[in-house]
Image (spheres, coloured by chain):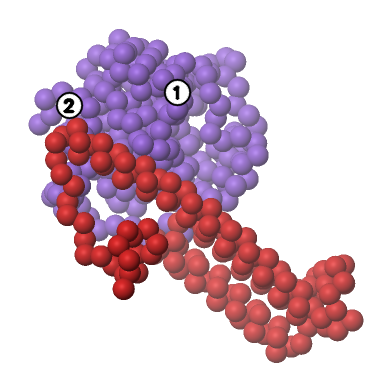
Chain colours: A red, B purple
Amino acid sequence: METLDGRVQFLAILGSALLFVFVLELLRRRRLAEPYAILWLAASVVLLILSIWDELLDSLADAVGIRTPSNALFVVGFGFVLILLLSFSSVISRLSRENKLLAQEIARLNDERGTRPAPAPQEDPGAGERQESPIP
Amino acid sequence: MSPEGRKLAMVPALNEEESVGTVVEELRREAPDFDVLVVDDGSTDATATRARAAGAAVISHPFNLGIGGAVQSGYRYAFLRGYDVAIQVDGDGQHDPSQIGTLEQELERSGADLVWGSRYLEEAGYHVPRLRRAGRIIFARIVSAITREAITDPTSGFRIANRRGIELFARDYPHDYPEVEAILMAHSHDLEISEVPVTMRRRETGRSSINMLNAGYYMVRVLLAILVGLFRRRPIPPPGDDWLAASPSGALEGAPR
């Protein structure tokens, strides 16, 4: 059973501490909403705890049969990445559903008021697959 | 100035078809000088129809925005239509419209911009789950410490605001668990706040938005918001003249009367 290399531990502590502070700063500047910030904060706190308290990391690695503790840290970090990505997919799904509803609602209002929608902006090649005209 | 009058009662409602009609009728009876607006936050039942039938103006969100979004819609409506006083009343019947006078008097007496009713006195049989009560006490301590006022019930949603309060909340309002944060927001913008004891009723229908399961999450969220809020300078610049009316969308133009 190995223990966590001192340099790895230093980097892990530094990295997760920086992440923690950075997320708080984004939150303070209102660049990040609380529900997402909470996930990120949880990830950075858990990683910080595991990298400071290396006996806990050792026993965690031991319990699940990972030989090197740094790999256990990696697995935990990867787990958080998966959770965050999945939550983004879920949020994006909700946003596109709401976006569609908004577009439909605006169309209905335009119809009701006899107004026309503003001319669509110039086609943006980055807009993706929903564009009808082929992208050059 | 608004043709409808100068005072607005805002009722955020999500799937409250059982109680919203009664609440609106009672508001019109007990507080006849208030116009009534129901903010239907994406209900899938007959909330909007019942509210309209009972004589309220209704704005309906195309989907659920959450309580903060619903309340803010009410304040935007109040701001754009030139109301001078706006009061929040829950759609589930727990706020007693006959107590509105108490809030109004306190608004006048104290000169505060935001006044809310504290469930200091509760009717017999009003059951507050222990967790909820504990949460209220913790938040009361924190809010009292930050604002340096003796506050007992910062989670109360029964609140009244004058034009300054309306303007602030029309511009910016917290999202999911907004009550505590809204008070601190008002405080950080140098608005005066005040609390007055009211009696509240047992909810007629519906459940609290805070149940045992998400109580912990609620605490963490609000505590984080409070903590981070302390380190914000003014969250937003001081109001200009026509910041909202000048928004290109003409935000509430389509609202039914």
Q: Quadrant for the N terminus of chain A, please.
A: bottom right
Mark closest to the chain's N terminus, 1 or 2? 2
- Evaluate if marks 1 and 2 touch, with contact meaning CB atoms under 8 Å apart: no
Q: Residue at x 20, y 25 (%)?
A: B257
Q: Amino acid at mark 2?
A: Arg
Residue A105, by quadrant, is top left
**Which label was assigned to residue B45?**
1
Q: Considering the numbered disc 2 on the image, is that residue within a helix, a strand or a loop?
A: loop
Q: Amino acid at mark 1?
A: Asp
Q: Residue at x 50, y 26 (%)?
A: B120
- Neighbourhood count class around disc 2 (C-alpha, 10 Å): few under 14, some 14–19, many 20 upward: some
* In the rendered image, the vertical position of residue A126 relative to residue B169, given as above or below: below
Q: Quadrant for the C terminus of chain A, please.
A: bottom left
Label 2 chain ID? B
For mark 2, what is the residue? Answer: B6
Tags 1 and 2 on a common chain: yes
Label 1 chain ID? B
Residue A99 lies, in percent from the top left, at 37, 48
* In the rendered image, the vertical position of residue B76 relative to residue B248, given as above or below: above
Of B95 and B143, the residue lying toward us: B95
Of A32 and B203, the residue lying toward us: A32
Residue B162 lies, in percent from the top left, at 24, 35
Residue B88, by quadrant, is top left
Of A132 and B184, the residue lying toward us: A132
Residue B158, by quadrant, is top left
Q: Residue at x 15, y 34 (%)?
A: A113
**Which label was assigned to residue B53?**
none
| Residue found at the far right of this picture | A1
Of A122 and A57, the residue lying toward us: A122
Q: Considering the numbered disc 1 on the image, is that residue within a helix, a strand or a loop?
A: loop
